[in-house]
Amino acid sequence: MVLVCVEPVLPSHTCGNPGVIPKGTVHGTRFNIGDKIRYSCVTGYVLEGHAVLTCIVSPGSGASWDFPAPFCRAEGACGGTLRGTTGTISSPHFPSEYENNADCTWSILAEPGDTIALVFTDFQLEDGYDFLEISGTEAPSIWQVDTTF
């Protein structure tokens, strides 16, 4: 007879170092459950994403950071971050045309469980060149349309 003793696996009590971000600084040196770290960017860059991350316990997966690490974007670059209950996203120089090869990334920050609704009032993509990608959902999607809304 073989007797196997199985002990329950306890969740990790550390989230680990989330790492440094390019053109940014992380403030905080403790990475255990309940600890918080704060990110900032060097002069000339703005933070995109959550500035403060908290080490939390996730059921079934142990300790993890409550949000992904942010990134630093050059001031004046195309894109941005929306926080709060409403906001507007527009292309550079709207309603005029934007430059060729513009690569705009917008982040919409919401609390877990919140619903984000996108309402388009004026929407144009250059057929064969432009696309809209929506990620961070259960099923990421890429929209390529050749019509104007």
Image (spheres, rainbow, N blue to C red):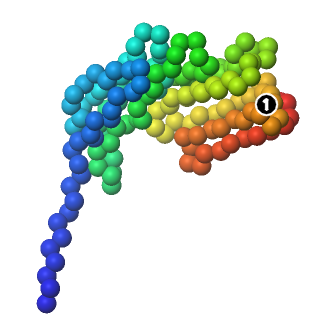
Residue 22, position as x, y percentages in the image: 41, 25
- Name the residue that disc number 1 marks: 125
Residue at 59% in and 26% down? 106
Residue 98, position as x, y percentages in the image: 74, 18
- Residue 38 lies, with reference to residue 143, above or below; the image says above
In which quadrant of the rendered view does residue 15 lie? top left
In which quadrant of the rendered view does residue 102 lie? top right
Residue at 56% in and 48% down? 138
Viewer-nearest residue: 19 or 62: 19
Residue 128, position as x, y percentages in the image: 80, 37
Specify the amino acid type for callout 1: Leu
How many numbered badges does the structure rendering display?
1
Residue at 28% in and 28% down? 36
- Farthest residue to the right: give it: 147
In the visual, does 116 lie left or right of 19? Answer: right
Viewer-nearest residue: 95 or 54: 95
In which quadrant of the rendered view does residue 116 lie? top right
Residue 149, position as x, y percentages in the image: 83, 30
- Residue 92 lies, with reference to residue 57, above or below; the image says above
In the visual, does 136 lie left or right of 88? Answer: left
- Farthest residue to the bottom: give it: 1
- Residue 87 lies, with reference to residue 110, above or below; the image says above
Label 1 element class = loop
Q: Is residue 84 visible?
A: no
Callout 1 crowding tier (Cα within 10 Å): few <14, some 14–19, many ≥20: some
- Farthest residue to the top: give it: 43
Quarter of the image with the N terminus in it: bottom left
Residue at 63% in and 25% down? 104
In the visual, does 49 lie left or right of 18? Answer: right
Q: Is residue 46 visible?
A: yes
